[in-house]
């Protein structure tokens, strides 16, 4: 994707930013993550994904977008967000697939997570980090493995 810089008239590369929230809880058999089953979105439908995620709006910080998406998609607020990674990723074929994703975890929040947008989510379920469902959105699965293994770098890449 490209945009024209109004100051110079030059065409510049543009990326699409998004924020993701993985809710985590500790259980007897280890940590669990809340995932949603995507449906009706046109992107990775039928895949398990972060319980809350979406595009960052103009003038919005990644943290504010993460909090807004959590309220809009699963009805929770006052999340204690912890930054995990900023992931630069590419689909290599379409300009719209040039992305920067900001991933957060939250271990505390207010409200009971539930599906707020049933047209976009077929299910919402807790899964052990050690036994994720199949399929999970690939770039999100990479982050979940990094969280599980305590190996996620603050800057990560996917698709290069």
Image: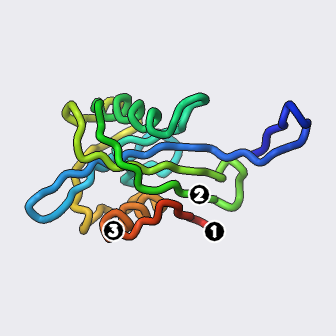
Q: Earlier in the sequence, mark 1 or mark 2?
A: 2
Circle 2 — which element?
A: strand
> Badge 1: few (under 14), some or many (20 or more) residues near its Cα, within 10 Å?
few
Which quadrant is home to the C terminus? bottom right
Residue 32 at x, y percent in the picture: 21, 56
Which mark is on residue 118? none
Q: Earlier in the sequence, mark 1 or mark 3?
A: 3
Residue drawn 56% across the image and 64% down it: 157
> Badge 2: few (under 14), some or many (20 or more) residues near its Cα, within 10 Å?
some
Residue 50 at x, y percent in the picture: 37, 49
**Mark 1 vs 2: CB contact within 8 A:** yes
Q: Which residue is mark 3?
A: 150
Residue 126 at x, y percent in the picture: 22, 51
Q: Which residue is mark 1?
A: 160
Residue 52 at x, y percent in the picture: 38, 41
- Classify residue 131 as left or right of residue 153: left
Judge whether 71 appears above or below 41 on screen: above
Residue drawn 45% across the image and 48% down it: 45
For the residues labelled 1 and 3, the Cα–Cα distance comes to 22 Å
For the residues labelled 2 and 3, the Cα–Cα distance comes to 19 Å
Q: Nearer the viewer, mark 1 or mark 3?
A: 3
> Badge 3: few (under 14), some or many (20 or more) residues near its Cα, within 10 Å?
few
Which mark is on residue 88? 2
Q: Nearer the viewer, mark 2 or mark 3?
A: 3
Tell which of 157 and 46 is nearer to you.
Answer: 157
Circle 1 — which element?
A: loop
Residue drawn 29% across the image and 63% down it: 132
Judge whether 48 appears above or below 122 on screen: below
- Classify residue 70 as left or right of residue 18: left
């Amino acid at each position: 994707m490209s945009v024209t810089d109004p100051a110079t008239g030059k065409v510049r590369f543009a990326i699409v930013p998004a924020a993701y929230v993985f809710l985590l809880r500790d259980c007897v058999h280890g940590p669990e993550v809340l995932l949603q089953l995507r449906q009706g979105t046109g992107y990775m439908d039928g895949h398990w994904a972060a319980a809350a995620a979406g595009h960052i709006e103009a003038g919005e910080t990644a943290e504010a977008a993460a909090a807004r998406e959590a309220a809009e998609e699963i009805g929770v607020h006052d999340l204690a967000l912890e930054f995990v990674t900023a992931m630069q990723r590419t689909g290599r074929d379409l300009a719209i697939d040039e992305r920067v994703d900001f991933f957060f975890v939250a271990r505390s929040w207010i409200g009971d997570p539930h599906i707020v947008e049933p047209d976009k989510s077929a299910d919402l379920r807790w899964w052990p980090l050690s036994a994720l469902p199949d399929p999970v959105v690939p770039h999100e699965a990479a982050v979940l493995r990094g969280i599980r293994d305590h190996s996620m770098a603050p800057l990560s890449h996917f698709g290069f």
